[in-house]
Amino acid sequence: MEPDREPPYYPASPESYSPIRRQARPRSRRFILVSLDDFRSLHMKTLIPMLALAISAAVPTLLTADDETAQDHSAQYKQLEQQINDYWHVDSTWVGTVNMDREQTLVHLMGAEVLTWQLQNNLKKRNDEEDYTIASSIGSRLHEEVLSAASDAIPVLRKHPNQRLVQLLITHLETYPHDWAQEGSEDLLPNLKKLLHAKPK
């Protein structure tokens, strides 16, 4: 019997997981919510692939009603989603270091969160209050994790600069559709911007 192995990260590029999206059946948003009930108790490397797959399977089915009369933030969210997908096309300055896990976790979290924004946007247009409430709950929990992971990364980013990651974090936080500064992380965005403009030592 082979020894237990740590589950791999969710595939880096969108091309690598497109077959998974095509083969997966649409998942219930309630399934995603149940998965998130164990958010704190699961190891991050185990949770992120499950979460990304579940959201990726549910969202395409629910984003088919975008029309020209109700764009809202759809274009902005899709642009950010593309930026996150494109992030993996360039080698990281952290590749081969102990910080690579941190970077992958952050980018996967942001990718999952932007999909929930698109989902909430679409459900709101449909006046689907029940599923909108579920999607909002998922989004809130994901956002807490994004803020926590980004805050924990600040000291590491000071010692080991990663400008592409900092810029993506800034763009992601500025795209957030709610006032996250009232959630106790009002210093996060200013600190990230200081890192972006800091002169190399």
Image: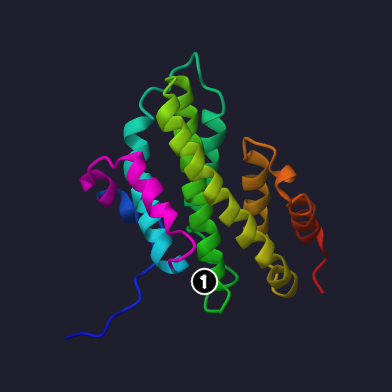
- Can you tell which quarter of the image residue 154 is in? bottom right
Q: Residue at x 45, y 25 (%)?
A: 129
Horizontally, residue 105 falls left or right of residue 154, namely left
Horizontally, residue 94 falls left or right of residue 40, namely right
Give the x, y percent position of residue 199: 83, 65
Q: Residue at x 41, y 29 (%)?
A: 130
* Residue type indicated by callout 1: Asp
Horizontally, residue 70 falls left or right of residue 30, namely right
Q: Is residue 135 above or below residue 167?
A: above
In the image, residue 89 lies in the stretch drawn in magenta: no
The C terminus, quarter of image: bottom right
* Residue 201 in view in this figure: yes
The N terminus, quarter of image: bottom left
Q: Nearer the viewer, residue 1 or 154?
A: 1
Give the x, y percent position of residue 49: 38, 60
Mark 1 highlights which residue?
A: 101
Give the x, y percent position of residue 53: 34, 52
Q: Which residues are magenta?
A: 20-42
Q: Residues within 10 Å of mark 1 (few under 14, many from 20)?
A: some
Q: Is residue 79 above or below residue 67?
A: below
Q: Residue at x 38, y 22 (%)?
A: 65
Residue furthest to the top in view is 69
Q: Nearer the viewer, residue 120 or 68?
A: 120
* Residue 12 in view in this figure: no
Give the x, y percent position of residue 23: 21, 47
- Can you tell which quarter of the image residue 131 is in? top left
Q: Is residue 77 above or below residue 153?
A: above
In the image, residue 33 lies in the stretch drawn in magenta: yes
The colour scheme is: rainbow
